Amino acid sequence: MEILKNPNYDFLGKAKIFVPLSVVLFLASIGYLVLHKIPYGVEFAGGTQLIVKFTSTPQIDRIRDVVEKTSPGSVIQTFDDPAKNQVLIRLPGAQSEEAAADLTGPAERVLAGLARDYAVNTVRESSSEIVGPIVGAELRRKAVQLTLFGLLFQLIYIGFRFGGAVWGAAATIAVFHDVIITLGLLVLCGYEVTLNVIAALLTLVGYSVNDTIVIFDRVRENLRHRRKDSLAKIINDSVNQTLSRTLISNGTTFLAVLGLYLFGGEVLRGFGFAMVVGILIGTYSTVYIASPIVVWWQGLRKDRRPAARAAL
Amino acid sequence: MPPALQNPFVLWFALTAALAAACHFGMRRELRVRAALYGSFLIACIVACWPPYGKDGQPGKIKLGLDLRGGIHLVLQVVTDDALNAVVDDAVQTVREQATRKAIVFTSAQRVDARSFSIEGVEPARVKDVRDLLRDFFRDGWDIREPGEGRFAVQMTENFVRQIKERTVKEVIRTLERRVNQLGVAEPVITEHGNRGDQILVQLPGVTDVEQAKRVIKTTAQLALKLVEDTSPSRESLLQAHNGKVPANMEVVEGAGDTPGQPVYYLVRREAVITGRDLKNARAGVDPQTNGPEVDFNLNAQGAQKFGRETGRNVGRRLAIILDGRVESAPTIQSQITDNGRITGRYTAAEADELAKVLRAGALPATLKYLQELTVGASLGKDSIRSGIMASAAAMAFITIFMLAYYKLSGLNAVVALFANLLILMGAMAYSAATLTLPGIAGIILTVGVGVDTNVLVFERIREELRNGKTVRAAISNGFERVWITILDTHATALIAAAFLFQFGTGAIKGFAVTLVMGLVANVFASYFVSKFLFEWVLGRRQAATLSI
């Protein structure tokens, strides 16, 4: 079985349509993320998140009444499979210095309140995540820093391996594009940005670059044999030659993370979503974004020498 | 199984020997060495990680993270100012004692902040004596300044401050280790955390009574027995006899009274008769008069000597037992006591037991503040394991079906490589005692996806070579050769991303990075070398005309 036999599509020709489209999507994502505040998970925002397992089906309204008494402004919702009788309670983070000193107080008061005022349905087990404001802020800073450093080091590595900063820059721009658009879609679909989501995005950085490198590697190989062809033609051919690999590899990885998204449980839902979306966008950007950037860059330099010498 | 084979190394050696013999007789010369080496490595991985998952209370070889087995994860901040305050207080005490001994008079000597103290109003004739005294006692770690008019300002150097902070954090860690040991937690983690130098990470896997664990960790347990001068229901009336001021060598401490909500104030000597440091042992006991729970303690030799001397001198007076700045009780000294005593208060049996435990483990040199708390219930952890296994199984099934359908028999090669990849990953995790977390399971699934990529790269290249009219043999060898560089580059960049993930240092994400890194390395071995070997083995020496790909 083969999906594609000797494909020969004009990918670079389509760049005229897709690059502007990507620019629009990218800017829209950034705009959306800036306007619509990024909903951080408890580990970044600080505050308290409880997952409470009740003996029988919990009545959300009654629980809300109890929780509101000690922590107004809390979010209460069913967690995971309703048959598991689990409720997620998110308490707002501490606003003042004194409140921050009593980090575990709100959670203890909520649990005490439930034991007292909702005694008919006892709490069987509770899990909690309580994050002070210092830790949250530190983690946010670290997340941004590490993602950017990760991108920078990959840029350097690729630039070094392919003997030109433009290759690194093209791959990095494509990946940055993937990360921002994935993040935008994630927030649009109502997911919180948690540590797991950040992990997914960083993995995406690694995975998405993989794809681009496979194509660039092929370009490098072709440049050695076909010194007469233009860089644009060589790149377009290389994309075609690696196309079935691009589709199959990403297809199988897509299947793997789809399994994760569907069966990985509530905790990994955001992670799974980010990976599923990220792989789709990553595949697209590999073909339509990274390669045109290299061609465009060489054209900008008005360098009419055979591409082989200009690039290597 | 014979007992000798229970030893994993012996078991590995026996299996490897059997495999080597099989290879010697059953395999072509050029494949023998590789077959034995790869096989022996995979056997080592199986032996290392078997059984992966614990049963009936027996721990498995794969260490599960807190999010999978339940437990507590705390990030605490050590309030190092407490320790600095104590050092400055000690220094002031030394100055006062030495001044009294040398008959030097000044208006005051007191602590200014956590790092400095001042002496004021030294009579001009004795300024030199004070200067000598300070030089004798505060030569190292202190800056002594003289702004004039009989004043001295003494401040700790930055170096000394840092030393004290480091020492305090280390001491807190040691104390917490002793306390946690008494809770009977298996495999606790107590280490420094972050790079601010004052944070501690405590992980207690499998702990169910969260409240008790938190209490045992956070109680400062500073015990001091001090002689009572006076008691009164209010602070004001207590100080009336002293013109409303606390006398220099005394202090006021609050304690619970007979009626709840009505505190009693005690005026006590500042200097303690004995402190928690003088204890040899403490245990929960029963008060013979009231049958209520209490804590009995023994003193070490030095403590017993001091206690004997002071109680003998002060029969009939009351002695306040102060724990973490509160008077627990203030019994009257009936007769001279030397090496043991009792702490009574309004305790439940469990509280008395806990108090005994923390007293045995020793006091914390500084108070602790919570920065982060994560507790995972055991059933939530079990749910996570179940979903993780489900997701992994689904991913494996999807990929296996696809690879077999698309690449036929060569797809089987990829699936074998995939299982070898997983085996190596498990073996490496068990061997290095790395922790498997829920994101770590996600990392494994991703490894499965990325692992297949290597096979796909090779297979597509082989197909291309076949289309260009190469023989099966040449196509395979060219295919593997040509993609080698690509595989190196893709794995290197993925490793860069994983390395930055590792920098996060947070438990669960670290677990993800660890599985990702190990998976990437295992993948190069399994999907490249093992897969290549399988091709050569199956195709044999004959000139195959077609390849099932």
Image: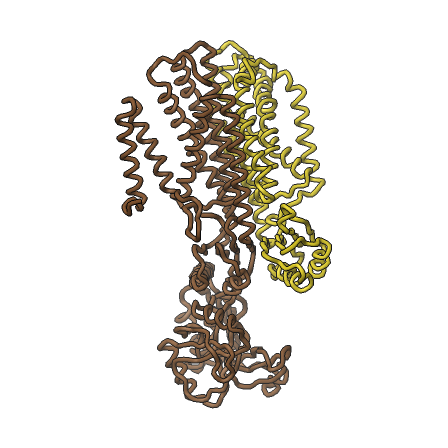
Chain colours: A yellow, B brown
Given residues B140 and A267, the one toward you in this image is A267
Could you tell me residue A215's position as x and y percent? Answer: 52, 21
Q: Judge left or right: residue B28 versus residue B395.
A: left
Given residues B298 and A218, the one toward you in this image is B298
Location of the N terminus of chain B (image quadrant): top left
Q: State whether residue A18 is above or below residue B319.
A: above
Q: Residue furthest front?
A: B1
Q: Residue furthest bottom?
A: B316
- Figure quadrant of residue B50: top left
Q: State whether residue A5 is above or below residue B240.
A: above
Q: State whether residue B230 is above or below residue A68.
A: below
Q: Residue at x 45, y 61 (%)?
A: B180
- Figure quadrant of residue A302: top right
Could you tell me residue B140's position as x and y percent? Answer: 40, 65
Q: Judge left or right: residue A252 versus residue B473.
A: right
Q: State whether residue A173 is above or below residue B369.
A: above
Can the viewer see residue B146? no
Could you tell me residue B484's position as x and y percent? Answer: 42, 24
Q: Residue at x 55, y 44 (%)?
A: A142
Can the viewer see residue B530? yes
